[in-house]
Image: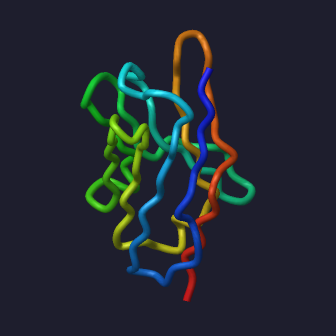
Amino acid sequence: QVQLVESGGGLVQPGGSLRLSCAASGSIASIKVMGWYRQAPGKERELVAIFTSGDSTNYADSVKGRFTISRDNAKSTVYLQMNSLKPEDTAVYYCNAFIWPMNYWGKGTLVTVSS
């Protein structure tokens, strides 16, 4: 079992940047599937960026070229660097880890992009 705690959300102007962090309660070195999802008001939760196996990554088309996912196994932390933010990026961002057969979620951190 693993607990995930997100941080780094907040209010940012369009074009700005934020870095989200997801701290895990235990080692993430063996977790192959781990990443970020988001849920905007009135919409379903969607994939943002994820490690799919080892260092392989997958991004939503809407964030490619703007967002970067990274991990620091020594710190048991996964990051999401978000640049060139747009109002449509406004959402609650959730950290996710899949450790077969369980899916683990954090409680989320709110990102608001507005002038």
Q: Is residue 55 left or right of residue 94?
A: left
Outermost top residue: 101
Tell me if residue 78 comes above or below residue 101 in the rendering.
below
| Tally of marks | 0
| Image quadrant in which you'd find residue 34 | top left
The x, y position of residue 72, in whole percent, is 32, 41
| Residue found 39% across the figure and 73% down from its top | 17
Extreme residue toward the bottom, this view: 115
- Residue 21, given in percent of the width and then of the height, sits at 47, 53
In the image, taking residue 108 as reference, residue 74 lies left or right, namely left
- Vertically, is 110 above or below 73? below
Q: Splitting the image into 4 quarters, where does residue 74 fall?
A: top left
The residue positioned 53% from the left and 74% from the top of the image is: 87
Most foreground residue, 98 or 1: 1
Colour scheme of the picture: rainbow
Work out which quarter of the rendered image holds the C terminus and state it: bottom right
Q: Which residue is drawn at 51% across and 79% down?
A: 12
In the current view of this chain or complex, which residue is farthest to the right?
A: 42
Q: Quick check: 57 above or below 70?
A: above
Closer to the camera, 71 or 89?
A: 71
Image coordinates of residue 113 in percent, x first then y, are 54, 76
- Give the side of residue 22 with respect to residue 68, left or right: right
Percent across and percent down for residue 46 are 56, 43
Q: Give the quarter of the figure containing the N terminus.
A: top right
Question: What residue is rendered at 42% in x and 22% in y?
Answer: 31
